[in-house]
Amino acid sequence: MSSSSWQHPFVNIFKHFDINSAKKCVKNGDVSTFIDRDLKSIVYRIRGLVPANNYIQFPSESLNQSLCLTGRLYYLLFRPMFDKCFCIHIDILTYEKHLIRISLSNLYRELKVTQASIQFPYMTTGTDIHWSVLCLDLHTILLTYMTNEHYHMIKSFQLCGNMFVKNCFTSQFLYEPGIDSDTAKRTGLT
């Protein structure tokens, strides 16, 4: 049995790494919980004037620890705050033993690729911002923008305010929105 078999079919990161544990997660700045009316569930609100000072980070000590999440797909259920800046940083360890940071932010105006990072702009249209499921295929991103790097695992990630977050997951499987588990089983989807 593979050492990463516990990660299949997916890892519920907030639950598995216990978002309420100071040993496994850092919540810095203005991070709070409340019940969202739309989701009818507890969500995390990350807000503040400087996004880098207000964040949720896994693991708590990203220099000395690693999440070792091998799922190539990173899912985030989130809602950006209207007219506020936010950033998502995911630190990837490649098979070539390089650390690559993949970032997504509405602060970025264009795609930027360096030797150690990839920055994606996040554009919103209009004033009506809804809950969204963001799915990043980390394996394909590396193959597309850094052809000599191959995805191995997520070392750490940081969600920097201003956003609402319900949860995040990793998986090897691409989940299709709108398909419930009964339909998936009936049609043979994994």
Image (spheres, grey):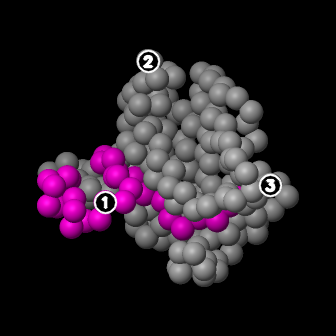
Find out whether residue 183 is within the magenta segment. Answer: yes
Residue 35, given in percent of the width and then of the height, sits at 60, 81
Amino acid under disc 3: Asp
Outermost residue, right side: 49
Residue drawn at x 81%, y 62% is 48
Label 3, label 2: how many angstroms apart (C-alpha)?
37 Å
Residue drawn at x 20%, y 52% is 189
From the viewer's perspective, is residue 185 above or below residue 97?
below
Label 2 Cα crowd, 10 Å radius (few <14 / some 14-19 / many 20+): few
Residue 155, given in percent of the width and then of the height, sits at 48, 46
Region rendered in magenta? 161-190
Residue 76, given in percent of the width and then of the height, sits at 51, 56
Asked whether the residues under the numbered discs 3 and 2 touch, taking CB atoms below 8 Å apart as contact, a structural biologist would say: no
Asked whether the residues under the numbered discs 1 and 3 touch, taking CB atoms below 8 Å apart as contact, a structural biologist would say: no
- Disc assigned to residue 179: 1
Circle nearer the N terminus (3, 2):
3
Label 1, label 3: how many angstroms apart (C-alpha)?
32 Å
Residue 64 visible: no
Circle nearer the N terminus (1, 3):
3
From the viewer's perspective, is residue 171 above or below residue 38?
above
Residue 166 visible: yes
Q: Which residue is labeled 3 in the image?
A: 83
Of residues 109 and 2, the one drawn nearer to the viewer in this rendering = 109
Q: Which residue is labeled 2 in the image?
A: 148
Tag 3 secondary structure: loop
Tag 2 secondary structure: loop
Amino acid under disc 2: Asn
Q: Nearer the viewer, mark 1 or mark 3?
A: 1
Label 3 Cα crowd, 10 Å radius (few <14 / some 14-19 / many 20+): few
Q: Nearer the viewer, mark 3 or mark 2?
A: 3
Q: Quadrant of residue 151?
A: top left
